[in-house]
Image (cartoon, rainbow, N blue to C red):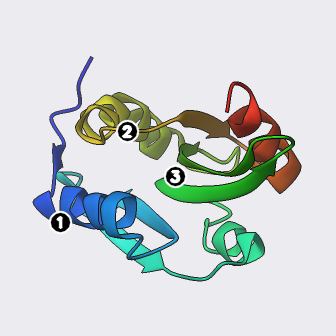
Amino acid sequence: MSSGVAVNPECLDQYNALKLKKASKYIIFKINDDNTEIVVEKKSDSQNYEDFLNDLPETACRWAVYDLEFEKEGAGKRNKICFFSWSPDDAKIKAKMVFASSKDALRRSLVGIATEIQGTDSSEVAYEVVLDKASRGA
């Protein structure tokens, strides 16, 4: 089921800039205040994963893409673009429902996602957990 929430073209522009030009390290997306469009909330070139986690609100749903760079033993440096669905336990029920039904519109428009991460609390988006998921098959 789709919520009818549209993806703002800037989301694709920023994603492509991250993917192709490494213009940022991560992008956080949200649904605008009138629940009609998915928009870019923030982009950052901070290399610190903790900065990224701190930008995910404790009580509101967000999507994000993060360009994860890591060393693979025997294979050298790797990059994987990770897609995050952040839906914290403390978010409002209606917001979670709109968020869940709007995800596919955004996810389908972002070509080249390697790993998908679902998070409802900080343990599910911890660096080690994300690294483990992303490095499988890298």
Residue type beneath disc 1: Glu
Please state which of the two labelled residues, at mark 1 or mark 2, is closer to the viewer: 2
Residue type beneath disc 2: Gly
Residue labelled with disc 3: 61
How far across and down, in percent of the image, does residue 118 sit? 63, 36
Give whichever of discs 1 and 2 has the lower sequence position: 1
What secondary structure is marked by label 2?
loop
Q: Which mark is residue 10?
A: 1
Q: Residue at x 84, y 40 (%)?
A: 74
In this image, 125 relative to 44: left or right? Answer: right
How far across and down, in percent of the image, does residue 58 sit? 68, 63
Q: CA distance from mark 1 to mark 3?
A: 19 Å
Quarter residue 33 falls in: bottom left
* Number of disc labels: 3
With respect to residue 40, does 38 lie above or below? above
Quarter residue 115 falls in: top right
Please state which of the two labelled residues, at mark 2 or mark 3, is closer to the viewer: 2
With respect to residue 67, does 21 lie above or below? below
Give whichever of discs 2 and 3 has the lower sequence position: 3
With respect to residue 116, does 121 lie above or below? below
Is residue 70 or residue 64 the one in the foreground?
Answer: 70
Please state which of the two labelled residues, at mark 1 or mark 3, is closer to the viewer: 1
Q: Which mark is residue 112?
A: 2
Q: CA distance from mark 2 to mark 3?
A: 23 Å
Are circles 1 and 2 on residues that touch, CB within 8 Å?
no
With respect to residue 84, does 68 lie above or below? below
